[in-house]
Image (cartoon, rainbow, N blue to C red):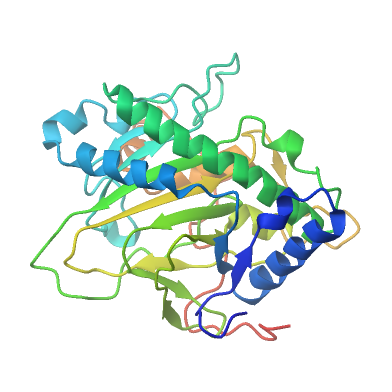
Amino acid sequence: MNESYVLPLVDISKMQSTVLSERLEVASALDQACKDVGFLYLKGDQFNFDFATSLIQVAKRYFQQDTASKMQHYIGLSKNHSGYVPIGEEQFAGNSYDLKEAYDVNYDYHGETTAFPLLGPTLWPDDATFKSTVSDYYHHLRSISEEIFQAFALALNVDEHFFDCKITHPTSQLRLIHYPYNPEVKDAEGIGAHTDYECFTLLLPTAPGLQVLNKQGEWMDIPLIENTLVMNIGDMMEILSNGKYLATKHRVKKVSEERYSFPLFCACNYDTIIEPVHSTEAPKYQPLIGGEHLFNQTAQTFSYLKKRIASGELSLRNAVPLSSFGMDENTEVQGANA
């Protein structure tokens, strides 16, 4: 870990190498960072931040529209949980919510399998530039995420291509999040501390505000580093690693300034059984279906899905509480640096 950073910084450039020992270097660094913290900075020759610059520009233009225009593509109108998310749509415990709006983009699936929620065509606004720019960024990061899955396979001592067949049409979601300027808000602790539901998240932040719960049970502020992404472990990787890596709770501070944030939540195919990759170990987790877990957790926070559940239109199978993974506040993990 570099002493000048609050998080480990991992360079994944060598995942493109044809030399196995060099790819194993990346896997080892990733493994250590995920064991120590579960949050890290990522850099690499793979990243083209021109895609990020264009994404930020189209997002700013999109969110400048009036609410009525944005609501024409409300997420509740979509088939795969994509579209515009107005302020207050996403609610946490006690019906609390962050002051933010978003546009959610899922894997734009046009295949024959239609029985799964979250799997289907993406609801796009009537803006060709928005669609092409967001799609370009999504596919750019998704291709890099495939290399990261291979690094995790090496770190977990399974075949390097273990995940390849499990991420052919994943329920990976890109969120374009806008925190509007609000002069009435004074800097305060954020609400909605949570873990991410998927395997891992690749976050492009544009301003400070992210806080992470470390293994001493303390909240840390995460500063920006130019030309890096922030990565964290999610629920599914916690299960796949059998607890070797813990999903890391995080939150966003309330500040008055306008901000944008762009997380890509990297998941497996909807029907993938998520269970520890080593059958020889005593499992600490019950197996679950990846897409089902993702949908269950999502449905516990989105108003339009809560209403469908309340009306009987939707039902959840094998749902677990939102706080089932990671560690709690004020709880220090013993041997955190082991």
Front position in the image: 309 or 184: 184
- The x, y position of residue 117, in whole percent, is 50, 29
In the picture, residue 24 is in which quadrant?
bottom right
Furthest residue toward left: 184
Which residue is drawn at the image coordinates 86% and 54% (left, top)? 20
Which residue is drawn at the image coordinates 80% and 52% (left, top)? 277
In the picture, residue 240 is in which quadrant?
bottom right
Quadrant where the N terminus is found in the figure: bottom right
Q: In this picture, is 260 found above or below 118?
A: below
Q: In this picture, is 332 found above or below 85?
A: below
User: From this viewpoint, is residue 213 visible?
Assistant: yes
Which residue is drawn at the image coordinates 67% and 86% (left, top)? 334
Quadrant where the C terminus is found in the figure: bottom right
Furthest residue toward top: 112
- The x, y position of residue 32, in whole percent, is 71, 72
Which residue is drawn at the image coordinates 49% and 31% (left, top)? 118
Please state if 252 lies on the left or on the right of 327 as rendered. Answer: left
Please state if 333 lies on the left or on the right of 7 as rendered. Answer: right
Front position in the image: 331 or 94: 331
- The x, y position of residue 63, in whole percent, is 20, 41
Please state if 235 lies on the left or on the right of 14 as rendered. Answer: left
Q: How many marks?
A: 0
Furthest residue toward right: 280
User: From this viewpoint, is residue 242 visible?
Assistant: no
- The x, y position of residue 185, in whole percent, is 14, 69
